[in-house]
Image (cartoon, rainbow, N blue to C red):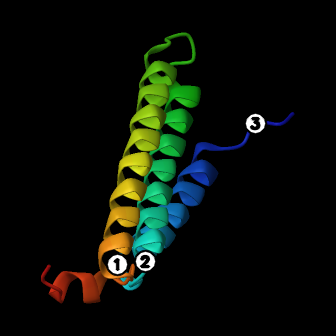
Amino acid sequence: MPNVPLQYWLIVASLLFSMGLYAAVARRNAIAVLMGVEMMFASANINLMAFWRYRWVHDLEAPVFITIIILVAACEAAVALAIVLSVFRRFRTIDVESVETMQG
C-alpha cells in the first residue's frame, strides 16, 4: 500500500472541519448542529492520527489521546441527544431558534 502524503490527510481534515462548521452554524435543527460538531471532532482526530503517523510512529501517546477524544465525543453526543429529546418533549420542536425564544 503506497504512502499517502501528509498534505492529503490535512486537506481531507480541513474539508471535513469546514463542512462541520457550516453544519453547526447554518442549520436550525438541533440534530444537524450536533452532527456538525461531531464532524469537527472527527477532523481533529484525523489531524492527530496523520501527524502521529508521519512524526512519532513508535510513541503511543497519540492513539491513546485519540481514543480518549472518541470516548469524550461519544459521551458528548449522548448527553446532547438527551438534552434534545428533553427539549422536544417540552416544546414539541427541535428548531434551535424557536426554542431560544420560548419561555417555559
Kindly identify which numbered label has been placed on residue 3: 3
Residue under label 1, please give it.
25
Q: Position of residue 28 (x, y in %)?
A: 38, 84
Q: Are marks 3 and 2 in contact (CB under 8 Å)?
A: no
Q: Earlier in the sequence, mark 3 or mark 2?
A: 3
Instruction: Work out how far the residue at label 1 is from the one at label 2, CA to CA, in angstroms.
Output: 5 Å
Kindly identify the residue that appears in the image at 37 percent across and 65 percent down.
Answer: 84
Mark 2: few/some/many CA within 10 Å (<14, 14-19, 20+): some
Kindly identify the residue that appears in the image at 48 percent across and 36 percent down.
Answer: 70
Q: Nearer the viewer, residue 7 or 62?
A: 62
* Front position among marks 1 and 3: 1
Q: Is residue 16 left or right of residue 86?
A: right
Q: Earlier in the sequence, mark 1 or mark 3?
A: 3
When the figure is inspected, residue 11 is found, relative to residue 60, above or below; the finding is below
Q: Amino acid at mark 2?
A: Tyr
Q: Position of residue 23 (x, y in %)?
A: 45, 75
Mark 3: few/some/many CA within 10 Å (<14, 14-19, 20+): few
Q: Amino acid at mark 1?
A: Val
* Front position among marks 3 and 2: 2
Q: Quadrant of residue 6?
A: top right
Q: Quadrant of the C terminus?
A: bottom left
Residue 18 appearing in the image: no
Q: Are marks 1 and 2 in contact (CB under 8 Å)?
A: yes
Residue under label 2, please give it.
22
Q: Position of residue 98 (x, y in %)?
A: 27, 89
